Amino acid sequence: MVMGAAGSKLEKALGDQFPEGEHYFGLENFGNTCYCNSVLQALYFCIPFREQLLYYYSNNKNLGDVEENLLTCLADLFTQISSQKKKTGVIAPKRFVQRVKKQNEYFRSYMHQDAHEFLNFLLNELADILEKESDAAKDSIETSSPSEKLANGPNHSLPNGVPKEPLLTWVHKNFQGILTNETRCLRCETVTARDETFLDLSLDIEQNSSITSCLKNFSSTETLNAEDKFFCDKCCSLQEAQKRMKIKKPPHILVIHLKRFKYVEQLGRYKKLSYRVVFPMELKLNNTVEDIDSEYSLFAVVVHVGSGPNHGHYVSLVKSHNHWLLFDDENVEMIDESMVQTFFGSSQEYSGNTDNGYILFYESLGGKS
């Protein structure tokens, strides 16, 4: 059996360096579910997220019959992986995939799906479920019921009767950052700032660039003039202005989505950009409001394989205990760290290299934010 052979090969490769208590399991593909598998592997090796989910599961199984939802299915899947007797193997995430399709018709078809849209849907859905559970707990007479503790994660108990507004679930605590949109009126110099939260950053990409330059472009100053003038409240009229986006609060887990699919007017369809975009192992965020350099370390990459947006395949690269692994549905293999750079993209327009980094997962080195 190939899968077993691959598993034992991985165990041989790691030998006595196999991390204690760790599990490397491939996920079965149900026709077109590589978009889901690649994201799940990245999230499983996002350790703070995994720990919160396992904590949620261990508490939740004592809460009676909680109605099945996406959160319980994911917690169940992660628990299944982490409690395997074997170190390697394959698991079929059947219940979870069925739940995704039940919940969202977008993922029901057998068409090629987008991993970034799936990640976005999943994180928002999990946060919604935790918020609802916490609201339900607040409605009950007890001030601190198990659900509320679970939504806030372990060790965040609140003083009796103190309302926590707004609720920051552990999904938010891991992934949410705050952007501030600053607009300066060029007539009166008044700066208007508007904050917005994000769970990931979608960046426009250019040929032969880097994540750092893409982030610089993301925060570059844009002039609003002609038809795009800004209504200044102080001047009470439309004025020329300058606008820029900065990161006000960097998240603990920074998820960067590279916009590799671009709509081409002349073609009337989306085209994949296999541009070479270098993503470093260690990333410094310079475009923050306070200008404090936030340092991050890369731990997972979801890779899109293929030349177009409507077909292709997803795999993920994951860093676990200082080893890099490649998860390709059922197959898991060890790779050399130097191999990660083969997924930057291609500096030639029409090259055969279509295995490109698409979603990057970085963890803050500054401890829990």
Image (cartoon, rainbow, N blue to C red):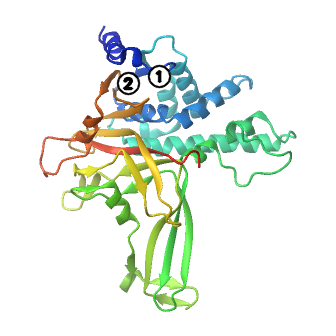
Q: Position of residue 166 (x, y in %)?
A: 70, 54
Seen in the image, is 325 located left or right of residue 272? right
Q: Which secondary structure lies at badge 2? A: loop
Let me know if residue 313 appears in the view: no
Can you name the residue that lies furthest to the top here?
1
Foreground residue, 71 or 199? 199
Q: Position of residue 347 (x, y in %)?
A: 16, 51
How many circles with numbers are drawn on the protein? 2
Amino acid type assigned to the residue bearing label 2 in the image: Phe
**First along the sequence among labels 1 and 2:** 2
Amino acid type assigned to the residue bearing label 1 in the image: Lys
Q: Position of residue 179 (x, y in %)?
A: 52, 62
Identify the residue at image location x=47%, y=28%: 97
Disc 1, disc 2: CB below 8 Å?
Answer: yes
The circle on residue 200 is none
Q: Position of residue 128 (x, y in %)?
A: 62, 44
User: Label 1 to label 2, Cα distance in Å?
Assistant: 8 Å
Foreground residue, 11 or 55? 11
Residue 208 is drawn in which quadrant? bottom left
Residue pointed to by mark 2:
30
Seen in the image, is 183 located left or right of residue 203? right
Identify the residue at image location x=38%, y=83%: 227
Q: Which secondary structure lies at badge 1? A: helix
The circle on residue 94 is 1
Residue 335 is drawn in which quadrant? top left
**Residues packed near mark 2 inside 10 Å, few (<14), some (14 to 19) or many (20 plus):** some
**Residues packed near mark 1 inside 10 Å, few (<14), some (14 to 19) or many (20 plus):** some
Identify the residue at image location x=53%, y=51%: 251
Q: Quadrant of the N terminus?
A: top left
